[in-house]
Image (cartoon, grey):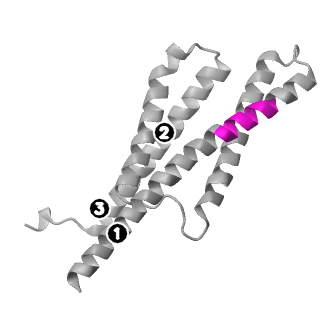
Amino acid sequence: MRDLIQDERTTAQKRKIASETCSLLLLALMIAILVQQYVLNLPFVNYAVEFICFFGACCYILIRNIASGIDLFSRKTTGIKSVLISSLICGLTICIVTGIANYARYGENATPNIWLITLAITFLCGTAAAFLGFSLIHYFNNKRQKDIEDELDEEEDDLG
């Protein structure tokens, strides 16, 4: 009987290890995608499986967290502020990655003005797309948090 009971600390540690493993695998998939796309200049067909696995896993994690009622945005900061900051960071990251890749491919042939305009457009489009995505996540997260609060209020009213 004692073998059937698991120590809470052991269970928590096993879950933490599994979570860290998942994070490391997602990071490895992202690096593999970037290397195949920008360093090796391979066509999308060669890394489509990694791309689908990475974004599928990210979507699953996101949906499960929201469905489980885990608040993805800190209550200490305003939600829209987090959305804006995340969007700017994401847009900047997209701009840097594509800027480096484009410079590596076309560096000798590119004119500085066109290259800077391309970077600015990439930053604006990346930030706008990220803002749209983060805004949707923020909306669904807030909706789920409101539903949970309503359920708890109903339970409290039923008990009182």
Residue on which the image places disc 3:
11
Q: Say which label, 1 or 3, has the lower sequence index.
A: 3
Along the viewing direction, whichever of 88 and 136 lies nearer the viewer? 136
Say which amino acid is labelled 3: Thr
Say which amino acid is labelled 1: Asp
Say which amino acid is labelled 2: Leu
Please indicate whether residue 119 sits to the left or right of residue 7 in the image. Answer: right
Q: Say which label, 1 or 2, has the lower sequence index.
A: 2
Along the viewing direction, whichever of 41 and 67 lies nearer the viewer? 67
The magenta stretch is: 119-128
Disc number for residue 150? 1
Between the C-alphas of marks 1 and 3, the distance is 31 Å
Report if residue 96 is visible in the image.
no
Along the viewing direction, whichever of 147 and 11 lies nearer the viewer? 147
Label 2 sits on a secondary structure element that is: helix
Image coordinates of residue 76 in percent, x first then y, are 58, 71
* Crowd around label 2: few <14 · some 14–19 · many ≥20 (10 Å): some
Disc number for residue 26? 2
Label 1 sits on a secondary structure element that is: helix
